[in-house]
Image (cartoon, rainbow, N blue to C red):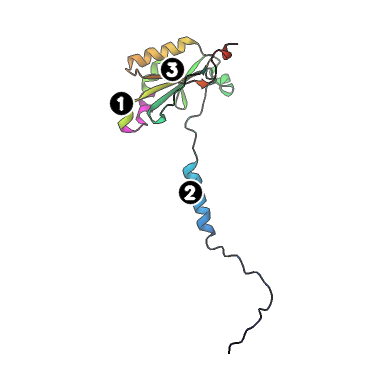
Amino acid sequence: MSKFKKKKGNEIPAVNTASLPDIVFMLLFFFMVVTVLRENDLLVQNDLPKADQLEKLEKDRAVYIYAGKPSQRYQDKYGTEGKIQIGDKFTDVKSIGFALTEARETLRPDLQDKVMVALKVDEDTNTGIVTDIKEELRELNLLRIIYITAPGNPVSSLN
């Protein structure tokens, strides 16, 4: 016959931490994949005008042009006149073509010929800047232009 022995002491066994590094690296990898990094550092004020009829834009086909007054931290250096931003730097009207060529090269090769220019213009920006941008885009034969707006009622923003 077999002998049964009582366990001496009621100690809890130690926690097995062998799989802990696997879990930590799996979480790290998950957050690295899921996190969206900011593409551009916004140098201009960008209070978009309101509109009530909006469509979703495919981001992989667009090159963004920002226009507006420099934000507060850049007004000492660049003044308060309206500026144009492409990517992470200010651009003047005559060098829009070069800046757009650089931005177009960052897109996928099959979409570089089908590029759309998205204008994000501050609602207090002078219309002359927008006209200058449109004329330069016309000379570059970039005729697909989209105006980015914020959702809302356009009439209530006039008050």
Label 3: which residue?
92
N-term mark: 2 or 1: 2
Residue with the most extreme right position: 9
Tell me the residue at 36%/16% (across/down).
137
Tell me the residue at 51%/15% (across/down).
82
Mark 1 surroundings within 10 Å by alpha-carbon count, few (fewer than 14), some (14 through 19), many (20 or more): few
Label 1: which residue?
113
- Of 53 and 100, nearer the camera is 53
Of marks 3 and 2, the one in the foreground: 2
Q: Say if 131 sits above or below 148 in the image.
A: above
Q: Main secondary structure of the magenta part?
A: helix
Tell me the residue at 51%/29% (across/down).
41
Q: Is residue 33 left or right of residue 112?
A: right
Q: Which residues are magenta?
A: 99-109
Q: Say if 23 sits above or below 37 in the image.
A: below
Say what amino acid the circle numbered 3 marks. Answer: Asp
Label 2: which residue?
29
Q: Where is residue 144 drawn, in percent x and y?
A: 36, 19
N-term mark: 3 or 2: 2
N-term mark: 1 or 3: 3
Say what amino acid the circle numbered 2 marks. Answer: Phe
